[in-house]
Image (cartoon, grey):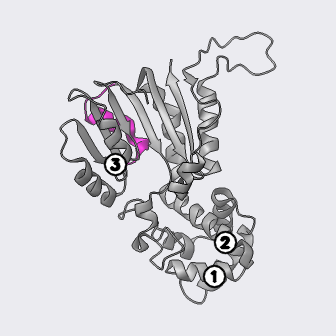
Amino acid sequence: MNIKRDGIYLDGTVGLGGHAAAILSLLSENGTLVGIDLDEEALTRCKESIGAASNCHLISDTFSNIPSILETLNLDQIDGVLLDLGISSLQLDSPKRGFSYRFNGPLHMGFSMTSSITANEIINTWSESELRKIIKKYGEDRMAGSVAKAIVQQRSDSDIDTTTQLRRVISTVVPPRYLNKSLSRIFQALRISVNSELDALTEVLKNFMNYLKPGGRMVTISYHSLEDRIVKQAFRGHAKECICPPKLPICQCDHKAAVQILTPHPVVPSEEEIIENSRSRSAKLRAVERL
């Protein structure tokens, strides 16, 4: 992040405030931190752990709305953006949120408890083709067709209202040795659909140069191939010197690279870190600097 003491930084997925606290510790009283999260419970806990710092603004919103959030705070450009993507341990370990197939709970899966759509609605009202599409697209699971069909067959008898019920339906068509992987992928697909995660990520990656100062940095941490692919392609696109069609012999676009890629290859956790925190094993960090 290359933190400047008087800089303005934005944590777009503030969660319980681990990264936010680290950034705040490097800022002077003239520096500013903006923390954003859709999860009201996480924000409450973050406020308790960080305290009432006058230079820290915690806001319940999605990071795709960063431009309007900055405008509300009368902030023009900022020195750095951090996005720690995916789901937090707080959410994953809370049965009432329905994110994990390990616990019995309602099929909610919204980052906000007031989410306009839930996994229950998707499972019980979407068509078989729609279910197959999101499981294949967002879960990359080869059993998408069989699982979608089994869900529709089951709900014709009675609604599927809990994570345990959904797990039971999936287990009827997925062989035991593949079950945990398929469960993880299918629950991921539902969570991404409920929260429009990839749309929000695409939106912020398209526009972050508009509010990032020259020399400012964008840092992302992703946990699955769909997120990482979107980040990698977006960063490469912004780093291009020329965007002319490949067949043109001479550049005619006068396009200039907007960023410098700081991580040609993603930074991944060490073996020691994975031992200490097993959930870090799939993390990939990428970073760019605004030119």
Q: Earlier in the sequence, mark 3 or mark 1?
A: 3
Is 206 displayed left or right of 242 in the figure?
Answer: left
Q: Is residue 164 above or below residue 256?
A: below
| Amino acid under disc 1 | Val
Q: Is residue 267 magenta?
A: no
Q: Which residue is mark 2?
A: 128
Is 259 displayed left or right of 90 in the figure?
Answer: right
Label 2: how many Cα within 10 Å (few below 14, some 14–19, many 20+): some
What is the magenta range?
62-76
Q: Which residue is mark 1?
A: 169
In which quadrant of the rendered view does residue 128 lie?
bottom right
The quadrant of the picture occupied by the N terminus is top left
- What's the CA distance linking mark 1 and mark 2? 14 Å
- Per the image, label 3 sits on a secondary structure element best described as loop
Q: Which residue is mark 3?
A: 17
Q: Is residue 285 above or below residue 17?
A: above
In which quadrant of the rendered view does residue 19 lie?
top left
Q: Earlier in the sequence, mark 1 or mark 2?
A: 2
Q: Is residue 1 above or below residue 243?
A: below
Name the one closer to the observer, 150 or 18.
18
- On the question of residue 116 being in view, the answer is no
Q: Is residue 66 magenta?
A: yes
Query: In front of the other: label 3 or label 1?
Result: 3
What residue appears at the point 59 percent right and 90 percent down from the top-left corner?
A: 157
| Amino acid under disc 2 | Glu
- What's the CA distance linking mark 3 and mark 1? 37 Å
- Per the image, label 1 sits on a secondary structure element best described as helix
